[in-house]
Each structure stands twice: as structure tokens, then as C-alpha cells.
Image (cartoon, grey):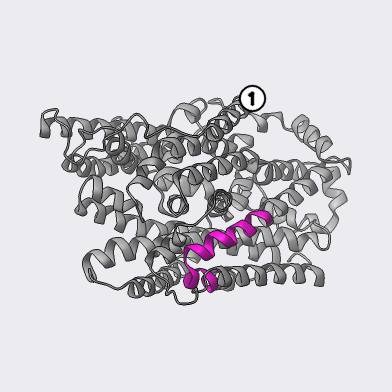
């Protein structure tokens, strides 16, 4: 059965949709006497202020996989899954201080473009094709699937119609407007996202406490399931393979975060569209601060749902509605949609708009970045080197539309995946260590050669698969090892970096590569505002891990 929506809920949701479409089309309209060019479409005319960048980073990142997937992992695992969010805050600071100065100084449109400038056109093309495939078949498809799953659970909308509806909504403004439409609507999306998430968190905690408020609810949840507040899991925990204790802090989670926040086109693209480096760094700092509170709106509700489901008295009070679409450890991703059933009239519309905002903003970001890579790194390079600015914008729109159609076909095929957030992280982790190794050494070790980078990138896949075979039990051979996937990512990164270093030294006998990046002493200098803010974020992180260590 579906959640009962009132007329007011529908009005609120419709108003949200109309506002997003209006703003997206308005801000991206062609100015009088000026026809939209590639920089306008793909980099928002390089005019974004820090607060738009910060909001857009979070809106692009927080999607169905966080709202649905991380709440599901909160239900099944607990607060430990929040390490993905809290360590992302620290990663953002590293990206802002050490990666952005190089990217912006080189005037990049795309991350593959950096590969061409540092290594070669061949390696750029290999990675560009890989990213296009990843965005279409994994990222876009999974966001559409999880979003449609939420619609199906909450409103009984069939999966196929949910996928089509979400894709058309995202396409309605992003295909025409480009990054300007995506980034400026993201400011509105983040307001809905945070407000709706806080509403759902309040409801869940207030229900658990018997109407005594959020703080009483937090206390009740902690007293009922203290084990779900352990940030560092021990080996006896059934979820240790997903979050391997101290390895989370010193191992593969760094690979996942540095790859995602530093070298992921649909994330880094909005920082490349800043007015200046300082403006971009302030936007990164804002996103890091917001990352500290995200677990409150995506993880805590999942833990509260677990307490509610396992408390007979609470379930009795919820009545018939409580039995609808009941989440279980085997179907943990139903936790967040299940909670939305209990919101009062009006607030359901806000919470549902928040969920839609998370889904649509991520879809729009991924579409824009997929089309940017295809247009600038494939079409302009190999198909039409002399394409006009108008032609590049047209190809960007067409390629985004094709990517969306393919993702719509793929999305329903992902059905049956539990804890989708963990699934996405695990299978992206097969390729991310090799790519991260190529970028880190390319940025910070001038001896890295193109040939060595290609060897390392190709070698990283069989290394990752070696660990995957052992972990999945696909072979009984004693030559395979069974270790958590985050540890697999860490070891794969270290081994790949070792291969690249050895290959580089053997090729150039220790001499610097001609394309090595000179790192001047003032390149990584940051403003007092960034430094103070970064220090405050790190203090909060230390306090959080000290409080919830085990």
C-alpha cells in the first residue's frame, strides 16, 4: 500500500517542481546578444560564487544512494557507515588545498583533460571512455533505480514510470541549461534536502521517545542499541567486512574519498566553474561543514527505524500503517521510505520534495558531466576538431539525452540489490584505486611517465580482481586471500603505485618526466578563512570519533 498524500502534500511537491524548472530555465537563458558557448554550458561561464559551489557539491553528492542507501546501512550497520560522510569532510579540505590549485591553474574543463596535459591523449581517451561508461551504467542507473524504488515504496508508482518521471524532470532543465541550470537549482535543492531530512529525523526520534523530542529520542535510541553507535567495528561484528575497523580510518576509505571528491568529473566540475581559486576553496570549505551534519539526516533515521521496528510497544502504537513495507535486515533499503509514511499532512510533501531534490540534482549533475566528457574529450578530439561553439553545446545536449535513455533501460535491471550504497562503493572500488594512483603520482611525483601510468592503470584491474576472487569465495585456492573490500582498495592502490614507480624509474632512469608538474612553494597557499575553517572541521571530526569510537 502507498503512503496517503493529502492535497496540501501534492501542492507542496508541485510547487517545488515548478520552482526548480523555472529557476533552471531562467538562469540559463541566453543573454541578449550573446549565444551560449562551451564555457557557458559546461562551466557556467566560470561565474559561480562560493556558496553556490558549496551547495552544488552537496546536492550533486547526496542522492537516493545516501537517503535510501545510507539510511538502509544505518538500519543494518549503524553509525559506522557515517565514516563515508565524516571522512569526506577531511577529504574535501585536502582537495581544496592540494588539488584545486593545479586544476584551476591549468584551466580545465574535464578531469580527462588533465590526463592529456600530464600524460598523453591515448590515456585521456581510455579514461574518458571508462568514465562515460561508469556514469551511465553505474551512477545514473543506480540513482534512477533507487529513486524509483522510493516512489514505488511510498506511492505505489511502478518502477518503470518512476524511472521515466525522474529522468524527464532532470532533463527538463539540465539538458537545455547546462551547468548554470544545475548549479543554481542545486542551491534550492539543498534547502529542501536539509529541511526535509531534518523533518524526517525529528519525526523518527520523536516517535521513539514517545513524543518527548529529539534529544530524548537520541538518548532512547542509544540506550536501546548502543552497538549501532560504534564507529570502529570489531571483527565479531557481522558488518566488519564492509567497514573493517581501524582500516576505515587508515585504509581503503581514503581511496574511495580521494577518488570521488578529487577526480570525479560530476563533483569537481562545479569547482572548476568558480570565479577564482579562493572562491572555489571557500565553496569546498562550506561543503566540508555541511558534510559533518549529513549523517543526522541520512543515517540516524535508519538507526531510529531499527529501534522502532524491534519495539513491540512502538509498533503497536503505529497500527496498521506500521506494517506497510516493513524494513528488515534483508531489505534494509526500505527503512527511509517506511519512515515517510508517518509524517503528518504537509510535511510529507516537504520530505518527498527533499528526496526528489536529492535524486534529481544528482541526475542533472551526472548528465551534465557525462556530456562534458563526451563533447570535449571524444567529439572535439576525434569527430569534429573544428566544431563551432554552438555545435559543441548541441552535441552536449544530444549526448546527455542518449546517456539518460541508456540509464533508463539499465535502471530496472538493478532490482533486488540490498544495501545499494555498499554495492556501488564495492564495485566502483575495482577501478578507482588504479585511477587514483595515476592521478596522485601524476600530480605530486614529476618522474611519473605516461607509459608507466598506462601499465599501472591496466595492472590495477587484475590486482583488484585477485582480491575480489578471494573475498567472494569464487576460488578455494590457498593463493587467494579473503579481506574486506576497503582493505582490498588500499592494497590495490599501494601495489599499483609501486608498479608505476618501478616502471617510471626503469624508463627514465630517475630523471623527471618532461610533463611533470612544477610545485612552487606558493602554489598551495590558502587564505586565513580556509585555514581557520579547516582547523575547526578537523577538531569536530576528532571529537566525533572520540565520542563514538566503540
Which quarter of the image is occupied by the N terminus?
A: bottom right
Report crowding for label 1: few under 14, some 14 to 19, many 20 or more residues within 10 A (C-alpha).
few
Say which of 508 and 211 sits in front: 508
Percent position of residue 299, x then y:
65, 42
Residue at far front of view: 33
The secondary structure that most of the magenta stretch takes on is helix
Dividing the picture into quadrants, the one containing residue 538 is top right
Residue drawn at x 32%, y 37% as measured from the top left: 440
Question: Which residue was labeled with disc 1?
Answer: 543
Magenta highlight range = 170-191
For residue 414, say whether it is visible.
no
Answer whether residue 268 is visible to the viewer in this image.
yes
- Of residues 371 and 478, the one drawn nearer to the viewer in this rendering: 371
Return the x and y of residue 46 as percentages of the image width and height: 45, 57
Give the vertical position of 14 relative to 100 (above or below): below
* Residue drawn at the location 61% of the way across and 52% of the way down: 68
Nearer-the-camera pick, 209 or 376: 376
Q: Is residue 253 located in the magenta-colored stretch of the structure?
A: no
Left or right for 271, reference 7: left
Residue 179 lies within the magenta run: yes
| Residue 426: image location, x then y, percent | 44, 44
Amino acid at each position: 500500500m502507498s503512503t496517503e498524500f493529502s492535497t496540501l502534500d501534492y501542492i507542496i511537491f508541485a510547487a517545488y517542481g515548478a520552482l526548480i524548472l523555472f529557476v533552471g530555465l531562467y538562469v540559463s537563458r541566453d543573454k541578449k546578444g550573446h549565444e551560449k558557448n562551451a564555457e557557458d554550458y559546461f562551466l557556467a561561464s566560470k561565474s559561480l560564487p562560493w556558496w553556490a559551489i558549496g551547495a552544488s557539491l552537496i546536492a550533486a553528492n547526496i542522492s537516493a544512494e545516501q537517503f535510501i542507501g545510507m539510511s538502509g546501512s544505518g538500519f543494518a550497520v549503524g553509525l559506522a557507515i557515517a565514516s563515508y560522510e565524516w571522512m569526506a569532510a577531511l577529504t574535501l579540505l585536502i582537495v581544496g588545498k592540494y588539488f584545486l590549485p593545479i586544476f584551476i591553474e591549468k584551466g580545465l574543463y574535464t578531469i580527462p583533460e588533465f590526463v592529456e596535459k600530464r600524460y598523453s591523449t591515448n590515456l585521456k581517451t581510455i579514461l574518458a571512455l571508462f568514465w562515460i561508461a561508469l556514469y551511465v551504467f553505474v551512477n545514473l542507473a543506480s540513482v534512477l533505480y533507487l529513486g524509483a524504488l522510493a516512489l514505488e515504496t511510498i506511492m505505489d508508482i511502478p518502477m518503470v514510470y518512476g524511472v521515466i518521471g525522474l529522468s524527464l524532470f532532470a532533463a527538463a532543465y539540465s539538458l537545455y541549461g547546462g551547468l548554470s541550470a544545475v548549479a543554481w537549482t542545486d542551491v534550492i535543492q539543498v534547502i529542501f534536502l536539509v529541511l526535509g531530512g531534518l523533518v524526517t529525523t525529528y519525526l523518527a526520534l520523536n516517535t521513539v521517545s514517545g513524543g518527548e523530542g529529539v534529544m530524548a529520542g537520541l538518548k532512547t535510541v542509544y540506550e536501546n542499541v548502543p552497538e549501532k553507535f560504534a564507529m570502529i567495528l570489531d571483527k565479531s561484528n557481522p558488518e566488519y567486512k564492509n567497514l573493517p575497523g581501524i582500516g576505515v580510518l587508515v585504509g581503503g576509505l581514503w581511496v574511495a574519498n580521494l577518488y570521488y571528491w578529487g577526480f570525479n568529473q560530476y563533483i569537481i566540475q562545479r569547482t572548476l566553474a568558480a570565479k577564482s581559486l579562493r572562491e572555489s576553496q571557500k565553496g569546498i570549505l562550506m561543503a566540508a561543514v555541511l558534510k559533518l551534519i549529513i549523517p543526522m539526516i541520512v543515517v540516524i533515521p535508519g538507526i531510529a527505524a531499527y529501534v522502532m521496528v524491534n519495539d513491540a510497544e512502538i509498533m503497536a502504537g503505529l497500527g496498521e500503517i506500521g506494517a506497510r513495507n516493513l524494513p528488515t535486515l534483508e531489505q534494509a533499503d526500505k527503512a527511509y521510505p517506511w519512515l515517510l509514511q508517518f509524517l503528518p499532512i504537509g510535511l510529507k510533501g516537504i520530505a518527498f520534495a527533499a528526496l526528489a531534490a536529492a535524486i534529481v540534482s544528482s541526475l542533472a549533475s551526472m548528465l551534465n558531466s557525462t556530456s562534458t566528457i563526451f563533447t570535449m574529450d571524444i567529439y572535439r578530439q576525434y569527430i569534429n576538431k573544428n566544431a563551432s561553439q554552438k555545435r559543441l553545446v548541441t552535441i552536449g545536449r544530444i549526448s546527455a539525452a542518449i546517456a539518460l535513455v541508456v540509464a533508463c533501460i539499465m535502471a530496472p535491471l538493478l532490482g533486488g540489490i540490498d544495501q545499494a550504497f555498499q554495492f556501488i562503493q564495492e564495485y566502483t572500488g575495482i577501478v578507482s584505486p588504479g585511477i587514483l594512483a595515476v592521478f596522485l603520482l601524476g600530480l605530486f611525483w614529476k618522474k611519473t611517465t605516461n607509459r608507466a601510468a598506462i601499465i599501472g592503470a591496466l595492472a590495477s584491474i587484475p590486482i583488484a580482481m585477485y582480491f575480489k576472487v578471494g573475498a567472494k569465495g569464487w576460488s578455494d585456492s590457498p593463493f587467494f586471500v579473503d579481506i574486506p573490500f576497503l582493505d582490498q582498495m588500499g592494497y590495490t592502490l599501494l601495489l599499483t603505485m609501486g608498479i608505476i614507480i618501478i616502471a617510471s624509474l626503469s624508463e627514465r632512469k630517475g630523471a623527471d618526466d618532461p610533463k611533470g608538474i612544477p610545485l612552487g612553494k606558493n602554489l598551495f597557499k590558502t587564505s586565513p578563512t580556509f585555514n581557520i575553517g579547516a582547523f575547526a572541521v578537523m577538531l569536530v571530526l576528532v571529537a566525533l570519533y572520540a565520542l563514538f569510537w566503540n
